[in-house]
Amino acid sequence: MSHKLEKIQYDAIRAAMGYRRSTPTNILLGESKLITIRDRARFLAENFIIKVMSNSYLSIYKTILDYLSSEHRMAIRQDKLLLQSIRSLHELIEEKLEQKETFNLYAHEFKDLMTKIPVNINIGKMIQTSRCTQLLTDELEKLWDSSYCLFTDGSKTQNGKSVGSGVICPQLKISEAKSICPLASVYSAVCLALDDAMSFALQYTDKDIHIFSDSLSVLQALENVNLSVTINNYICEIKRKYNFSSQAFPNRIIRFYWIPSHMGIQYNEEVDAIAKSATENQVLNIKKIPFTDLRERSKKQAIESTTESIVEEGNYKGREYFQLFYENGRKPWFKRFKKMARNTIVWVNRARSNHVNTASSLHRINIVNDPNCPCGLAVQDLDHILWHCPKYRDHRIEMMQTVEKHVPLPTDINSILQTLKLPIIKAIDKFLKKCDLKI
C-alpha cells in the first residue's frame, strides 16, 4: 500500500511542479520539501497516540495502557505502525505529556471560551513603522501613576536546558521567571507568561492593568474564539481570569498590547533577558506540556528522517542537484518570489534537476540517439541553447544585455540557478518564450 501511495505522491509532485517522469524521486522531495509517505504516516500515528493519551477519559487510552502492561502483547503483530509508535512514545508520554480527564475545550465554561479579549496593536504598528520607541515611552508616562504595566515574554534557545517564560512589573518591582519542559513551544511559554500576568492582575486590584507582549499570535488567540480540542489551556485560563476580574472589579481596566520585538524597548528587553535566563535552569517549574507542543517534535523527526534519506540517495542518484542546489529548509526555492509565473517555476525546476527537453538530457535516458544540437556545433544542453547556438543569435541579444549587468561573463546556467537573481531569470524566461522553447 505504501508503494502505491508513494507513486501517487510522486505523480502529484511532477504534475504540480512540472518535472519530467525521469526526474529522480529524491529530487522531487528535495525541491518540494515534502516528506515521504512512510515518514508522514509515522508522524500522523505519533500525533494520534499523543493526542489520545492526553485524555484519560477516552476508552482507547485504557486500551493502550492495557497493551503496554500486558504480558501477552508479544502475541500481537509488532510491525504495525501504531504499535511501534505506542512503544517508542511510552517513556515520553509518561514523563512529558500533560494528561487530564478531558480535553481543555471541555474543561472550561462556555462563556469563557467565547470571550474575545480586545488587544491594542495600534501602538505596536506605529512603533514598527516609524522605528520610534519613544511612542511607547510617552504612552507609559500617561499610564504610570494610575495603573500597573506588566511585560511578558517566552524564550527557547538552541542549546537551552529548558524553555523559559518571564513577567515583570516595573512599578511593583517584581519579576517572575519559570522554566518549562524543553520540548515546550515558545507559544506555550508566552501563554504561561500572560497567564502569570493575569494572576498578578488578580492579586493587585487597586489599579488598572496594562499587559504587553511581542507575540502577536498569542494575543490574536485571546482576541478570537477557538472551539477546538487543540486550544492551549493557558489561553482558557487567561480568558477565565479576565472574565472573573471584569465581574469582581467592573470599574477596573485590563488591557493587552502588542509591541514589536528586538527594537530596544527597555522593559521588553528586560523581560526577554529574564525569560532567556530561565532556559538555563535544569530544575523545571513545569515538567509536562500539552499534546500540541509535542507535535513539533514528531514533525521535526519526520523531516529529519526524509532529509537523511534523500541526501544519502543523493550520493548515487541526483548527485549534481544535491551538490549544487539542495538546501535543507522547509520551503521550496520559489517561495521567496511572490508572483513568479508557473511556467517560470517549471523550467527552473527542470533545469535544476538537469532533466530537461534537450538532446543531451534525452539521450542520457535513451529517448533520442544523438545528443548533438541540429546546428552541428556542439552537444545540445541548456548552456549551448542559451549562450552559443547560432539558431537563437538574434533572440539572445536582449537577454545577454540583462545578464551582463548582473554577473560577469562568461557564465553558465548552474551558476545562475544557484544565485537565482530575478532579473536574469526573467530575461531567460523571455528568451525561451521568444524562441518557443519548452525545456
Image (cartoon, rainbow, N blue to C red):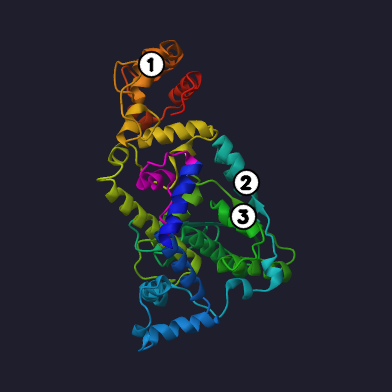
Residue 328 at least partly seen: no
On the image, numbered disc 2 is attached to which residue?
A: 139
Residue kind at label 3, given as amino acid type: Gln
Residue 354 coordinates in the image, percent (x, y): 35, 34
**Comparing labels 2 and 1, the label whose residue is closer to the camera:** 1
Q: Residue furthest left?
A: 315
Q: CA distance from mark 1 to mark 3?
A: 48 Å
Circle 1: residue type: Glu
Comparing 110 with 390, the one in front is 390
Q: Quadrant of residue 115?
A: bottom right
Q: Is residue 383 above or below residue 209?
A: above
Q: Are marks 2 and 1 in contact (CB under 8 Å)?
A: no
Asked if residue 188 lies in the magenta stretch, the reply is no
Identify which amino acid the numbered label 2 is placed on: Glu
- In front: mark 3 or mark 2? 3
The residue identified by callout 3 is: 220
Give the extent of the magenta segment.
17-37
Seen at 44% across and 22% down, the residue is 428
Any part of residue 387 in sight: yes
Identified at 33% across, 57% down, the residue is 159
Q: Residue at x 53, y 77 (%)?
A: 55
Residues packed near mark 3 inside 10 Å, few (<14), some (14 to 19) or many (20 plus): some
Residue 309 in the image: state x and y as whole percent: 31, 53
In the picture, the quarter occupied by the N terminus is: bottom left
Q: What residue does disc 1 label?
A: 404
x, y percentage for residue 53? 48, 76
Disc 1 or 3, which lies upstream in sequence?
Answer: 3
Q: Residues within 10 Å of mark 2 (few under 14, many from 20)?
A: few
First in residue order: circle 2 vs circle 1: 2
Eyeballing the image, is 322 above or below 386?
below
Residue visible at 68% across and 74% down?
Answer: 109
In this image, 308 relative to 154: left or right? left
